[in-house]
Image (spheres, rainbow, N blue to C red):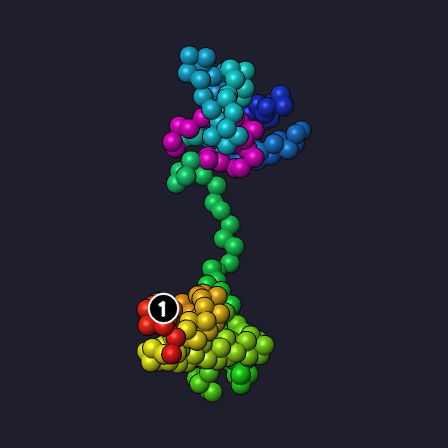
Amino acid sequence: MNTATVTCTCGARLEVPEEASGQRFRCPACQAVIDPAAPRVSPVSAAQPATCPICQTAIASEDETTICPRCAQVHHRACWDEIGGCSTYGCPAAPELAKEGQAQQPLAAWGDTKRCPACGERIKSIALRCRYCGTDFHTVDPLTVGDLHSGVRKTEELGSLRVKTIALFVLTLSGCLAPITLIFSLAMLLPRRVQLAKAGPAVLVLAYATIALAALYSILIVIFFVTHGMP
């Protein structure tokens, strides 16, 4: 039977049958993977320094190397044996990667469904209104009953603030009540600028208009009494 001699990196010389000379096997001495089909070069020329694409370190002239028979990429022999082939993406000599099951269908951030805090029914995670009880939500995030009640309270507070702003504006237009509405406007509306903005830009403008008109009418009233005297 004809045989071929293969030398391992550990120095062991192995006799391989010619019909199996192209097959990979492990060295019985060091258990390193030997690929007789891959050409091996040593040393590397100093004039043409190379870097192993696997370990990203320079290949010294005394290092055992393996050249990929398909793309001619130079590797450390140990690195080639470790990954079981070429490191070049798409190279036919690159090792096949094991597929880790089928890709899962992405879900929404909170899952496919969430529970309505008002009626407890399951609804779509991206829903802003419950299709069972008609409750509206200000966010797509899951809410608790406490969150829902807090949102209702904030909505009621904004509605009350909107009504107070309109009432103060109407009273200010009368003129004679301007000093009183100015005091209430400065005490009630000015500190709540953030809430007024949430109630809507029209309400915020109306609040500033109320303060400005109340201040203007108050100044006119003071000038009138100063020039004409108190009755």
Give the structural element (helix, strand or loop) at label 1. Answer: helix
Q: Among all residues in the image, which is located at the extreme bottom?
A: 133
> On screen, 119 above or below 77?
below
Q: Residue at x 47, y 17 (%)?
A: 44
| Range covered by the magenta-colored residues | 70-87
Q: Position of residue 167 (x, y in %)?
A: 39, 81
> On screen, 24 above or below 158?
above
Q: Residue at x 59, y 25 (%)?
A: 8
In this rendering, would 175 be left or right of 112?
A: left
Residue designated by label 1: 226
Q: Residue at x 61, y 32 (%)?
A: 32
Please indicate, yes or no, whether residue 210 appears anywhere in the rendered image.
no
In magenta segment, residue 125 = no
In magenta segment, residue 81 = yes
Q: Position of residue 124 (x, y in %)?
A: 46, 76
In this rendering, would 170 be left or right of 103?
A: left
Q: Among all residues in the image, which is located at the extreme right?
A: 29
Q: Position of residue 209 (x, y in %)?
A: 34, 69
